[in-house]
Image (spheres, grey):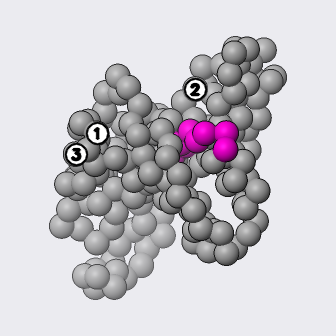
């Protein structure tokens, strides 16, 4: 971890690693045949099932940490419609491109029960890097509540420890 003096509080801090996922959750559930018909890069994923094709992009979700200078970042995947995915890909190298899409959260985050996926807004500004994701505030789910209310520093560090100890 990188140490630095925080401009917010003046204390020495260490950067928290992002909780990152190498692929959307459905990719890890594929059969060998489905894997052969699917594509995965560091930023894009296309899964071709026998009856449908699913499109995913890598994005960033930033979780506010209450009473702390640092926030917790997630490197997540969201599914997009074919039309949105194609527009995103067509503008991938266009630094001036900005856009917004509807998407579905496509990873399971530590400490949350996911009986159904969470609807999101995906905002693209190629000048700043990967798209940013915001869950729909009206969707009733503990993660959505925590996203908009914030979590404690201890909770953020516990989640990081869970992920680091899995690897």
Q: Earlier in the sequence, mark 1 or mark 3?
A: 1
* Nearer to the camera, 91 or 32: 91
Estimate the spatial distance between the alpha carbons at disc 2 and disc 1, rounded to whole Å: 22 Å
Q: Quadrant of residue 41?
A: top right
According to the image, label 1 marks what residue? 139
**Disc 3 target residue:** 145
Q: How many marks?
A: 3
> In whole angstroms, how far apart are the C-alphas of marks 2 and 3?
24 Å
Q: Nearer the viewer, residue 85 or 164?
A: 85
Q: Is residue 3 left or right of residue 154?
A: right
* Nearest to the observer: residue 17 or residue 3: 17
* Label 3 crowd (10 A; few <14 / some 14-19 / many >=20): some
Residue at image x 72%, y 60%? 92
Badge 1: few (under 14), some or many (20 or more) residues near its Cα, within 10 Å? few
Dot 3: what SS?
helix
Observer-side mark, 1 or 3, equals: 1
Q: Residue at x 60, y 20 (%)?
A: 29
Q: Nearer the viewer, mark 2 or mark 1?
A: 1
Q: What secondary structure is found at the residue carrying circle 1? A: loop
Q: CA distance from mark 1 to mark 3?
A: 9 Å
Where residue 48 appears, x then y in whole percent? 73, 24
Quadrant in the rendering for residue 130: bottom right
Range drawn in magenta: 75-83
Task: Determine whether label 2 and label 3 are within 8 Å by CB.
Answer: no
Q: Is residue 125 left or right of residue 45?
A: left
Label ID, residue 16: none
Q: Position of residue 99 (x, y in %)?
A: 57, 62
Residue found at the very far front of the displayed protein: 83
Disc 2 designates what residue? 26
What is the x, y in percent for residue 33? 78, 14
State whether residue 160 is above or below residue 4. Answer: above
């Amino acid at each position: 971890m990188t140490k630095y003096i925080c401009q917010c509080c003046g204390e020495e801090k260490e950067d928290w690693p992002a909780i990152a996922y190498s692929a959307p959750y459905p990719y890890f559930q594929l059969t060998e045949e489905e894997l052969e018909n699917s594509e995965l890069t560091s930023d894009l994923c296309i899964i071709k099932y026998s009856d449908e094709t699913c499109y995913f992009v890598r994005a960033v979700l930033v979780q506010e940490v209450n009473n702390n200078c640092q926030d917790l970042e997630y490197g997540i995947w969201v599914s997009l419609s074919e039309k949105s995915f194609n527009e995103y890909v067509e503008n991938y190298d266009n630094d001036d491109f900005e856009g917004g899409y509807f998407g579905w959260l496509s990873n399971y985050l530590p400490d949350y029960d996911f009986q159904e996926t969470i609807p999101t807004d995906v905002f693209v500004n190629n000048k700043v890097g990967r798209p940013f994701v915001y869950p729909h505030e009206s969707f009733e789910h503990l993660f959505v509540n925590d996203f908009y209310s914030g979590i404690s520093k201890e909770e953020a560090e516990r989640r990081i420890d869970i992920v680091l100890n899995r690897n």
